Image: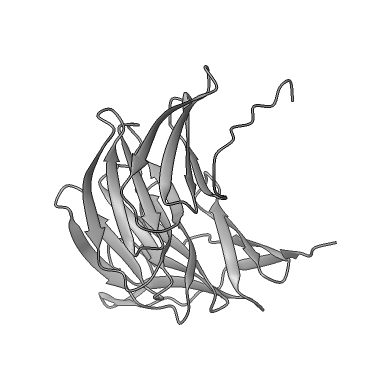
Amino acid sequence: MSSIITFIFYGSATAISITPDGNHVISGSTKSTIKVWHLDTKKLHFVLKGHQDEITSLAVTPDGKYLVSGSKDKTIKLWNLETRKECFTLKGHGDSVNTLSVTPDGNYVVSGSKDNTIKIWDLEKREEMLTFTGHKDSINRIKVTSNGKLVISASSDKTLQVWDFETREVIATFTGESAINCCAVAPDDVTIVAGDEGGNMHFLRLEGVGNREQGTGNREQGTEKRQKAKGKRQKASRE
């Protein structure tokens, strides 16, 4: 590592994102503000204000024009990074918005909340599209696969679930021994890594799950059956 740049601001840093062009870092804090930093000048570029509580999650749309933010104030906001203004606010969660992810086409936002639900929002229509209610505890992390077909959710109910974006069904579930706090999806859209509260990392392989050509589930006489697969599991324990 040739150099280290440190940005100092008031309040604990709670969320961070980088614009697709790599020119700006965006940070959220306990002070309910969002700050955009320029990497070249190493200076604060501008500040976005509007949330009423801690910023929990940030995501930039693929075109780099918009920022989506989630907060403990139960809302999601869309910001125009060019005009530096708030576009609109999405309301619907009954508790803190813990995590969010933007779909690869930039048309939808998927959010997870402390209210145990996952919601998909249509950014063009500025409204809630649908709600997933399969978890029994707080949603800690949401990821969308690079092909936009699957939504991965990690929850305090000790499960990691894989949802089909179109059919709205759970097509795979992994159950751990403690709350699953985070997850990541490899570019192959098949390998998932999840971390739990007990200090373990779980490596999951989902071959065949979400394959449109082969169908998302077992088909018999034209009827689709809901799949409850656990995938292949490997565990790496904390030393």
Residue 28 shows up from this direction = yes
Where residue 34 sits: x, y (%)?
A: 41, 42
* Residue at the outermost bottom position: 136
- In this picture, residue 133 sits left or right of residue 128: right
Between 77 and 131, the one lying in front of the other is: 77
Q: Residue at x 53, y 23 (%)?
A: 39
Between 84 and 161, the one lying in front of the other is: 84
Quadrant position of the C terminus in the picture: bottom right
* Residue at the outermost left position: 125
Residue 146 shows up from this direction = no
How many numbered marks appear? 0
- In this picture, residue 189 sits left or right of residue 216: right
Q: Quadrant of residue 183?
A: bottom right
Q: Residue at x 30, y 49 (%)?
A: 50
Where residue 152 sits: x, y (%)?
A: 46, 61
Q: Quadrant of residue 35?
A: top left
Where residue 40 sits: x, y (%)?
A: 53, 17
In the displayed structure, 20 sits above or below 162; it is: above
Between 131 and 230, the one lying in front of the other is: 131
* Residue at the outermost right position: 239
Quadrant position of the N terminus in the picture: top right
Q: Residue at x 51, y 43 (%)?
A: 16
Q: Residue at x 28, y 41 (%)?
A: 79
Between 169 and 199, the one lying in front of the other is: 199
Where residue 171 sits: x, y (%)?
A: 42, 71
